[in-house]
Amino acid sequence: MLKSGLFAAMTLLSGLMLTGCLSDLEAPQLPPAAYVSIYQGSPDAPALDIFANANRVTNMPLNYSEVLAYSAFYPGNRTFRIAPFNSATSLVEKQFPLVADSVYSFFVVQEGEAVNAILAEDVWTEPATNRIRLRLVNLSPDAGELSLQAGEAASDLVSGVDFKEVTEFKDLPSGNTTLRIKSSTGATLITSGTLELRSKRVYTLIVRGKKSEASGDKKLDIQLITNYIY
């Protein structure tokens, strides 16, 4: 999905170069790669460094609610290590298999006082014109199961989404709408302002923070991330 777009761009650039000077050479092939984005969803964690095997992924401290865009990773079993910024002490190490030509999201989460991580494969189809794709990710350790209502729809887009759960991408019309997060009892926990969901885009709605926090950066909140633009 992402690799095809990157490869198309490289092929186009190479084609322009080869037409001018090296028409007898083939365009270079990209090495096999998986593509991973990283989101820091642990409200109590310090600024972080992320490593994949011995390779440092972050070149700056990764703070709460910050996201790193998709980047290429070698396929295979990769050991991800999360550490405080510029520290040799690991908070957690987890191994995840990465498959070539696949796309993933890596989420740093909080469980009790510990930092943990989950990996979700990002699978979607291209939205039609005037449509979008949207999924829900529950990273709140104390909000319980959640539901998402889009606009004034009679039924929820997704429901019963537990902590650390990542839903499938759902089809929605583009345009201005509001998104409402509800508890397992149906009570509204968060309502967004009016959001402009643009045609042929892929989005992730993250529920982050703690229900027990009444204010401040750690309070229960939502964050809309754009995964892909067609």
Image: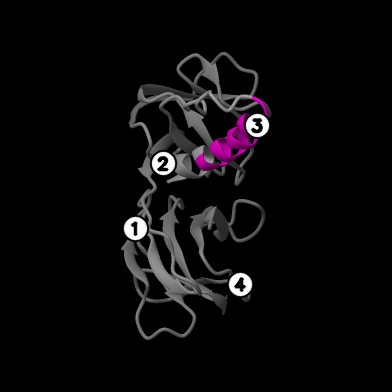
Query: Reading the chain from its start, which is encountered first: label 4 or label 3?
Result: 3
Instruction: Single out the mark in the foreground, 4 or 2.
Output: 2
Q: Residue 17 carries which label?
A: 3
Give the spatial CA distance, label 2 vs label 1: 14 Å
Instruction: Single out the mark in the foreground, 3 or 2.
Output: 3
User: Callout 4, which amino acid?
Assistant: Leu
Instruction: Give the crowd class for mark 4: few <14, some 14-19, many >=20 residues within 10 Å.
Output: few
Query: Reading the chain from its start, which is encountered first: label 1 or label 4?
Result: 1
Residue at 41 percent across and 41 percent down: it is 103
User: Callout 2, which amino acid?
Assistant: Val
The magenta stretch is: 8-21
x, y (%) of residue 207?
49, 57
Q: Which mark is residue 194?
A: none
Q: Residue 103 carries which label?
A: 2
x, y (%) of residue 213?
57, 56
Give the spatial CA distance, label 1 vs label 4: 21 Å
Pointer 1: what residue?
Answer: 168
Residue at 42 percent across and 55 percent down: it is 138
Residue 214 visible in the shown view: yes
Decide: marks 1, 3 in contact (CB < 8 A)?
A: no
Residue at 33 percent across and 32 percent down: it is 99
